[in-house]
Image (cartoon, grey):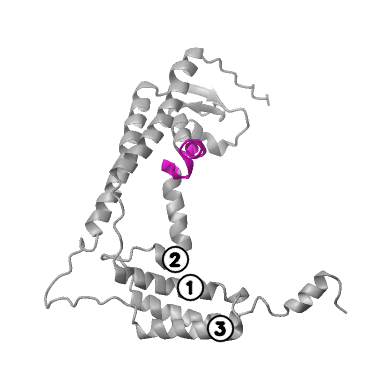
Amino acid sequence: MGVKAAQDLYLDPSIRNWVLVPITLIMLLVGILRHYVTMLLTSPPKPAAVDVVREQRAIGRAQLLRMTAPFSPLSPAAYRSISAAHSTVLTSGQYLKIKPKPKEGEIPNPFEGGGMENAMEGMKKQAVMMVPNMVIMQYISIFFSGFVLIKLPFPLTAGFKSLMSKDIMTPDLDVRWVSALSWYFLNLFGLNGVFRLILGDAGPQVESRDANALAQLSGAGAVSLSGPGAPDMEKLFKAETENLALAEGLYRWSADGVEDRVLEIWGKKQ
């Protein structure tokens, strides 16, 4: 059985000058332009209502106390006093905003409470993201379909074949050869680091990922607290009260045994 010969293709330098480099520059410029267009279309945030902020801060303080319980800077008496005060406030519901009672037979409007504004903001951002990508992808598919642009300098497994050679119907071609359409997708998902260097931490691709991460880390404070999609704060208050009671079992004072630890560090402990 013979050994398969290595595949060597000699590409015209014009492909590099008129296809490879222009696609990369276009993707870079479109990403920067998309970032600034998104900034222009994004409406300034409206200040939250006082009662909404009061709910948010009440549950935020309780969460902060609970999360620091395993290594708390508060003394046992102070921690239990503050925990009891938070539990009383959350249970009484004195920080809950007053909800207007719906009239009999009235159907709630799903676009009230900022729902329409949030929907329009999302649609504008999606349009700014999708329209340029669709135009560029269609342009590349029409004018540069079947072009081989570059050979990657590192080996790849056969599983990357569908990613690197989307529009080249040659199953025997080395997987390291990249087609024009595949080069577009590589730039689409691989220029995040370049955008971060040029635009800072508010790059077009980085922006949405950081927002999602912030929402996961911030808990209830990152959830929209108004409109039809708002959480039931009464249930959140009740759950946080139970969490505070459970956190008391995990409480540990950070200064507990500090004298022995200091003596041990200085080698003075007997």
Principal secondary structure, stretch drawn in magenta: helix
The kind of secondary structure element at disc 3 is helix
Q: Nearer the viewer, residue 69 or 219?
A: 69
Distance in Å between CA atoms under marks 3 and 2: 25 Å
Q: Which residues are magenta?
A: 189-205
Nearest to N terminus: mark 3 or mark 2: 3
Q: Quadrant of residue 118?
A: bottom left
Tell me how far mark 3 sits from mark 1, CA to CA. Answer: 16 Å
Q: Are marks 2 and 1 in contact (CB under 8 Å)?
A: yes
In the rendered image, residue 238, in percent from the top left (x then y), is placed at 40, 81
Residue 245, image x, y percentages: 51, 84
Number of labels in the image equals 3
The answer to whether residue 192 is magenta is: yes
* Residue designated by label 1: 63
Q: Residue furthest left?
A: 105
Residue to which mark 2 is pinned: 219
Q: Residues within 10 Å of mark 1 (few under 14, many from 20)?
A: some
- Name above or below for residue 70 compared with residue 150: below
Which residue position holds label 3? 78
Residue 244 visible in the displayed image: yes
Which label lies toward us, 2 or 1? 1
Whether residue 162 appears in this view of the structure is no
Between the residue at mark 2 and the residue at mark 1, the CA separation in whole angstroms equals 9 Å
Q: Is 152 positioned to the left or the right of 48 in the image?
A: right
Examine the image and state in which quarter residue 153 appears.
Answer: top right
Please state which amino acid type lies under the numbered disc 3. Ala
